[in-house]
Amino acid sequence: MNLSFYPLDLKLKHTFQIARETRDVQNNVVVQIKDRDGIVGYGESAPSRFFGEDVTSVTKTLVQSRDLLKNTDPFQIEDITLHLKNKFPKDAAARAAIDIALHDMIGKKLKIPLYKFLGLNRHERKTTSFTIGIDTVEKMCKKVEEARDFPVLKIKVGMKGDTEILKELRKTTKAVFRVDANTGWTRDEARQKLNLMEELGVELVEQPFPVGSIESLKAVRRHSKIPIFADEDIKDSKDIPAFSDVVDGINIKLMKCGGIREALRMIYTARAHGLKIMVGCNIESSLSITAAAHLMSLVDYVDLDGNLLVTNDPYIGATVDQGRLTLPEGNGLGVEARRTMPLSSLQGGADKDRTSVSACHL
């Protein structure tokens, strides 16, 4: 198999702010893996600096992965992904791109959609939340109005005055609120804010404290009626047992765990520990969002809106109507290219003169 890749810079509709960072562009990487029969699988890496990854680290990992894939059978995807995890344990987003591309390729080789290959149900649709990033009260209210077709909103909090903002947002919409503090609260803040959020009808709260704050999670959970979900604390399946009696649920992201194979392990491990499950995302195109959407029948909550927050998504995949996600019917991921896009390789050289991705089925 031959691996190639190129950059994908996604421009955000609004400046995206959470408790710890602000950005206007998300720098991702698209991966192509071609087998001997000329079948191509596509994947995407959306690295997060919080977990120590960026385009440079992703590029390095992808280059070093080429030799491993050259004479490998794509159907040995379990062996391939486990080998990559052992070799690149800290490079989950890079590994996720390869994992997604292999699953896309296998579906195309078998001429079936990914959900069928995984034995899942395409017709079990779920409602995705739509994210409202931190901003002024006026701008957040405007964002809520723009998202009026979404019955569930994920509100980013973790800053001074966030409860007052929630009160104002509640005046403008009857949508279900999910709240994500992105590690931004102290224990005392959480106790005060959760009491108010119960009155505002908040459905769940994600990652209230910095990573590793197990005692704070235990203390707050005892006094809160709102379910607490772990996100940054839970990278992959090995992290779940330590939090099984600390939180009510976990947020699984392909970019955080390394792809579909590990996401499935996380789902089964979480169920064995009686935890609820959300499938989430970073800022991503429809390529990797659709990959995650193929798992939605296995989870309780869906937060797959990263592609809806950008202005230049080059792909068409899972679609959203009134917040409800529908999977495409094509083989593999079922993703199509929206428009012509140059395949300029990150490291330059041989890939620069290759043909573009045309607006056709990938």
Image (tube, rainbow, N blue to C red):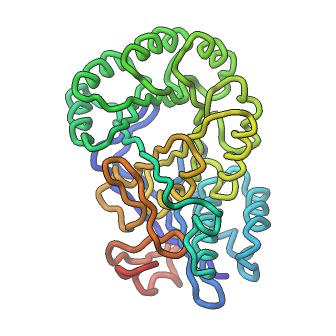
The quarter of the picture where the N terminus appears is: bottom right
Instruction: Determine whether 223 is above or below 75 in the image.
Output: above
Q: Based on the displayed image, in which of its 4 quarters is residue 139 positioned? A: top left
What x and y, as percent, mark residue 296? Answer: 54, 51
Image side of residue 316 versus residue 62, left or right: left
Of residue 248 and residue 185, the one placed in the foreground of this image is: 248
Which of these two is toward me, 343 or 104?
A: 104
Judge by depth and name the residue closer to the eye, 69 or 327: 327
Relative to 4, is 21 on the left or the right?
Answer: left
Q: Is residue 4 visible?
A: no
User: Number of labelled discs?
Assistant: 0
Q: Is residue 48 left or right of residue 157?
A: right
Location of residue 175 with respect to 56 vertically, above or below: above
Residue furthest out toward the bottom: 37
Position of residue 294 in the picture relative to residue 150 (left or right): right
Where residue 41 appears, x then y in whole percent?
Answer: 56, 75
- Look at the image and tell me whether residue 311 can be seen: yes
In this view, 100 is above or below 68: above
Q: Picture coordinates of residue 10 (x, y %)? A: 37, 57
Q: Position of residue 145 (x, y in %)?
A: 21, 37
Residue ID at (51%, 10%): 191
Q: Quarter-wise, where is residue 76 in the image?
A: bottom right
Q: Residue at x 37, y 82 (%)?
A: 358
Q: Residue at x 56, y 81 (%)?
A: 40
Residue drawn at the location 47% of the way across and 74% of the way down: 330
